Amino acid sequence: MKKAQKGDQVSFNFIVRLDDGSVIDSTYDEVECETDHEVDSGPMQLTIGDGTFFTQVEQALVDMTEGATKNVVVPAEDAFGAYDPDQVFSLQRDQIPMDFTPEEGDLLELSAEDSDQAEVVKVLAVGDDEITLDANHPYAGQRLNCEIALEKILS
C-alpha cells in the first residue's frame, strides 16, 4: 500500500482538542466544536511539507497510508504561541466607543487611527475608569491534541 511522502498532495480529516478535551476545530460535520469552525467541513487538502498546517501534523502524515489515523501533539509555542503577559493592558473608559458597554469576556476590535488593521482583544476586567484587555490569541499557551485521518493520497 502506498505511503504518503513529503511533496505529496493529500486529503485528510482532523479533530483538534485542548488538554481539557474541548474540541476547538474539526473537519467533521458531526463533531461539535466549542467555537465556530475555522475550516470548512470535509477533508482538508495540502501538499505535505508546504507549511499549510502545523509542522508536526504535516510531518505525521509522512508514511501514513490511506485510512490510517494518528494522534499528534502540537506544543503551545508551535500552535498559537506562549501566553505573553505583556499583551495584557488597560484603557481608560473614554478611549473605547461610547456605544460599547464592555463586560468581562467580551471581544473588542481595536485599531490605531493610522492603520487599516484591527486586532481582536478580550475584555478581562471592567472598572469604573478603565478596562483591562488581553491581546493574546484565545489559545495562546495551550498545546493542541490533533487526531488526523489520512483520507487520500492525491499525487
Image: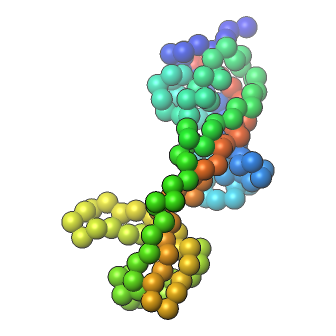
Residue at the image position 57 percent from the left and 19 percent from the top: 154
Q: Position of residue 95 (x, y in %)?
A: 35, 82
Q: Where is residue 75 in the image (x, y as percent from the top left)?
A: 63, 38
| Quarter of the figure that contains the N terminus | top right
Horizontal side, residue 11 vs residue 33: left or right: left
Q: Outermost residue toward the top? A: 1
Residue sitting nearer the eye, 147 or 73: 73
Residue at the image position 55 percent from the left and 48 percent from the top: 82
Task: Please say if 76 is above or below 103.
Answer: above
Q: Outermost residue toward the front? A: 86
Residue at the image position 56 percent from the left and 34 percent from the top: 54
Residue sitting nearer the eye, 88 or 147: 88
Task: Please say if 127 is above or below 40.
Answer: below
Horizontal side, residue 150 vs residue 113: left or right: right
Q: Outermost residue toward the bottom? A: 128
Residue at the image position 51 percent from the left and 55 percent from the top: 84
